[in-house]
Amino acid sequence: MIIAGPRNNDYTMLPVSTVSRKENLDVLYDIEIDPQSYPKLNLNSASYVRAHKQTTVHKGSLVREISDMKTEYVELYVLILEKLESFNQEVMNEAL
């Protein structure tokens, strides 16, 4: 899920994963997406946006847009950004 960019040809994103081992889920920062509840996201199975695993990818690694969550599901998009902000604030508090 792209959340920012491009900046110097890089995009900031959050991974979306099926998370096969449920014990690896973070109860605070993994947001479940049920494909039946969000059909316009074109997911084949229940997936999780991992708000605590922000990363950067080069634009050359992007193949195609699957969906526009920001437009199609505003409430879900805002919830994910709130979780990201909460995680980043937690990291900053621990760093200080």
Image (cartoon, rainbow, N blue to C red):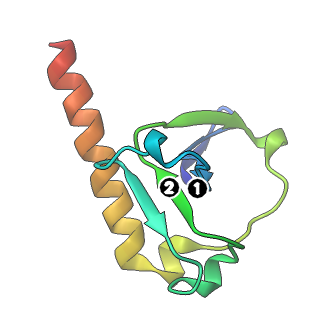
Residue located beneath label 2 in the image: 49
Residue occupying the point 34% across, 48% down: 29
Residue occupying the point 81% across, 61% down: 64
Q: Quadrant of the N terminus?
A: bottom right
Q: How many marks?
A: 2
Q: Quadrant of the C terminus?
A: top left
First in sequence, mark 1 or 2: give its number.
1
The location of residue 31, given as percent across then percent down, is 41, 59
Judge by depth and name the residue closer to the eye, 77 or 23. Answer: 23
- Which mark is nearer the camera, 1 or 2? 2
Cβ atoms under marks 1 and 2 closer than 8 Å: yes
Residue type at mark 1: give it.
Answer: Met
Residue type at mark 2: give it.
Answer: Val
SS at circle 2: strand
Residue 1 bears which disc, if any? 1
The location of residue 56, given as percent across then percent down, is 61, 33
- Residue 16 sits above or below residue 23 on the image: below
Residue occupying the point 18% across, 18% down: 94
Residue 58 in which image quadrant: top right
Judge by depth and name the residue closer to the eye, 75 or 4. Answer: 75
- Residue 54 sits above or below residue 40 on the image: above
Judge by depth and name the residue closer to the eye, 2 or 45. Answer: 45
Judge by depth and name the residue closer to the eye, 89 or 24. Answer: 24
The location of residue 14, given as percent across then percent down, is 53, 46
